[in-house]
Amino acid sequence: MALNTQLILETYIENIIQIMTPYGTGSGFIIDNMIITNSHVASGLKEVVISSKKIKRAIAPVIYDDPYYDLAFIDFDINTPKNPLKFTTKMVEDGDTTIAIGHPYGLNYTATEGIVSRASRLQDDLEYIQIDAAINPGNSGGPLLNMDGDIIGINTFIIQNANNLGFALPYFYIQEAITAFKKTGKKNIIKCRSCKNLIEEKEIKNDYCPECGVKLEIAKLRRKGYNPVGATKLLEDILSSLNINVTLARRSQASWKIDKGSARININYYENGIIIGDTKLCAIPNKNIEKTYDYMLSQNKDLSYLQFSINENSIYLSYLIVDSSLTFNEGQLAIKRLLENSDKYDDILINEFGAIKLKRDEEE
């Protein structure tokens, strides 16, 4: 029986995963006790950060990387969703209604409806399902479903500057890849995009395929990993020294987010060289406004490195510095104070001055 878009999203939302790397975010979905996504979403890394309705932000290993099909499999101890996804058993046809689910631009659990413009469109010797459902950066790796809620493909790429021209790798390629991977009985497998053999990573020497000799770019990327440099590395070293897991805190190569009590601390490194660590604490109260201002001004006199400010009606506690002036010791002291004081001042302003507690998403 065909379902509507909202019901499909509600039914299968537990299966949808957000995937984060230093290079961006994407989507994935649970099937066969693994998380399936695109190779380009995994970004050639051995591990990524995942989250979902049932999975708190966590680090998970990439155990299969296939640049030919643009597929990657992620291993995680997953509780089977209440309504698990399954592959379709029907032929995909032109004009079929489809639903693309993912996290475009960080907008979690977005479902867009469209139709199959072409059930089989050949691109680089592979068949793709061409769809007109709106898919955007962040949708990659998410499932493409039919109106029965079954997987017909994985949202893989769009044509830039075109009006809703999206392409999904069909389900039968995904099934083939899962079967071949499981047949190896091993993990950390790379598929050579030239000879198509599945190679165990430890068998790869100097990043060359042992079967056909072609250079394996994915092997090189996995070996090198992500290595921050300059002020970015210094910031991550500071965070690590404060017992912050930088992999979980990292939102991009220049952005970190840390939850501390009721406060959420954002650290951003901008292209102009300015580093800002700030916490959006609470909203100014309806009453006692003057007393609240007096309190913050009095605290500003005593706070070293940090300062209260107000943007519109929100109260911020902030630390600002230029990258050329950042040192480990002073940066560590300032960020430590920001972490320690954000939750404290949030509570004081709310409980003693009647400031308004802000709502925020658990994950973004």
Image (spheres, grey):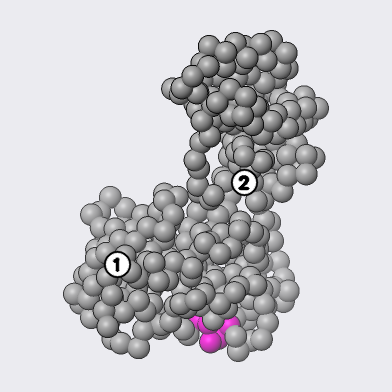
Position of residue 249 relative to residue 300, above or below, is below
Q: Nearer the viewer, mark 1 or mark 2?
A: 1
Front residue of this view, candidates 354 and 266: 354
Q: SS at mark 2?
A: strand
Q: Tag 2: residue type?
A: Arg
Residue under numbered circle 1 = 5
Give whichever of discs 1 and 2 has the lower sequence position.
Answer: 1
Q: Position of residue 316 (x, y in %)?
A: 56, 25
The x, y position of residue 345, in whole percent, is 65, 27
Which residue occupies 25% across, 54% down? 162
Instruction: Indicate the quadrant where residue 332 lies.
Output: top right
Q: In the rendered structure, which segment of residues is drawn in magenta?
A: 177-181
Residue 52 lies in the magenta stretch: no
What residue lies at 61% left-to-right and 58% top-to-bottom? 56
Q: Image height check: is 80 above or below 38?
A: below
Local secondary structure at mark 1: helix
The amino acid beneath tag 1 is: Thr
Q: Tag on residue 37?
A: none
Query: How many numbered badges does the structure rendering display?
Result: 2
Residue in the image at 48% along x and 70% along y: 15
- State whether residue 275 appears in this view: no
Residue furthest out toward the left: 95
Whether 291 is drawn above or below 319: the answer is: above
- x, y percent for residue 135: 33, 58
Badge 2 is on which residue? 250
x and y percent of residue 308 in the render?
A: 60, 19
